[in-house]
Amino acid sequence: MRHIEFTIDESYNGKKVNAYLRGCAKLSARLVNSLKRVENGITLNGEHIRTIDILHTGDVLAVNIPEDSSKIEPIEYPLNIVYEDDDILLINKPAGLAMHPTHNHQGDTLANAVAAYFLNKGKNVTFRAVGRLDKSTSGLVLVALNKMAASKLSGEFHKTYYAVVSGEYQGCGTINKPIYRPDPMKTLRAVGETGDFAVTHWEALVTDGTCSFMKIRLETGRTHQIRVHFASMGTPLCGDDMYGSSDKRIARAALHCGDIDFIHPVNGCSMHFSVPVPEDIQAIIPKKS
């Protein structure tokens, strides 16, 4: 059970519990409704309270979020944990590890590894990744450890990616091209007018005229967005055999999530984390021409 307290200030004096939970606490309507069905899911000064009841300055409003009942099979796998507290887990995912179990991946995913990690700590945690990375992409994955954290972090984080792309880039730029799924039975994406709005911002860090090392920020989060956008420019990521061609220098698409920024869902602190570019990408970063 995750117990979280809020002290009511003057701005919510005389207002309803629901107004605070949906407003200041920024809980989703779905979460608030689910807590109403939990014994002592919402309390005021230690006593059960209804969401229509009135608050007063100095009151202590609390929510008690039940522990999850994860159905993902726990499978032992070493995790590179960057940060952990009662509400979030930040992992540096290696390339080659899928995020979730699928028909192609049963037991060999990050979700299975996280389930095993918490089982060893006597906890049952549902795997709620805030954003996702492709199997071949390395780097930071943020996991919400309860419904409140998941609700407040959804769409409220910023990642910075690093990639080596074929071709020469200089300065900064933006790729604004819609992305769609040509075949619903395949994961392959493509640029096309019928697709969903997709925007990628890039900065060229170094180039040798043949390849470029790029710093990338996403305005939208479409599946394979970075890979599809650069392929559409005729400059696919090095090693990306799905959207370009294989590269004997690297065994996967040269893409890494190196930085993440977000506001902590409970304490409100600004959080920033960075992890270095892994060796396989470092080995192919071009030297200045």
Image (cartoon, rainbow, N blue to C red):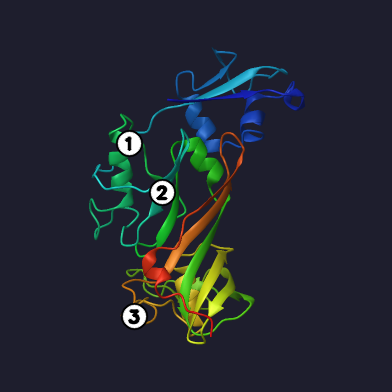
Q: Mark 3 points at which residue?
A: 247
Q: Which quarter of the rendered picture does the N terminus lie within?
A: top left
Q: Is residue 164 left or right of residue 173?
A: left
Q: Residue at x 56, y 34 (%)?
A: 266
Q: What residue type is labelled 3?
A: Asp
Out of 199 and 192, give the one closest to the viewer. Answer: 199
Dot 1 falls on a residue whose secondary structure is helix
- 108 lies left or right of 187: left
Between marks 3 and 1 in the image, the one whose residue lies nearer the viewer: 3
Q: Dividing the picture into quarters, in which one does residue 51 lie?
A: top right
For the point 52% across and 41% down, which residue is it? Answer: 151
Neighbour tally class for label 3: few under 14, some 14-19, many 20 plus, Cα within 10 Å: some
Q: Is residue 98 above or below residue 185?
A: above
For the residues labelled 1 and 2, the Cα–Cα distance comes to 14 Å
Say few, some or many: other residues with alpha carbon within 10 Å of mark 1 (under 14 / 14 to 19 / 20 or more). Answer: some
- Residue closest to the eye, 125 or 213: 213
Q: Label 1, on which residue?
A: 118
* Disc number placed over residue 91 in the picture, else none: 2
Q: Which of marks 3 and 2 is nearer the N terminus?
A: 2
In the picture, residue 246 is in which quadrant?
bottom left
Q: Residue at x 50, y 74 (%)?
A: 213
Work out whether residue 152 or residue 89 is closer to the camera in this orientation and state it: 89
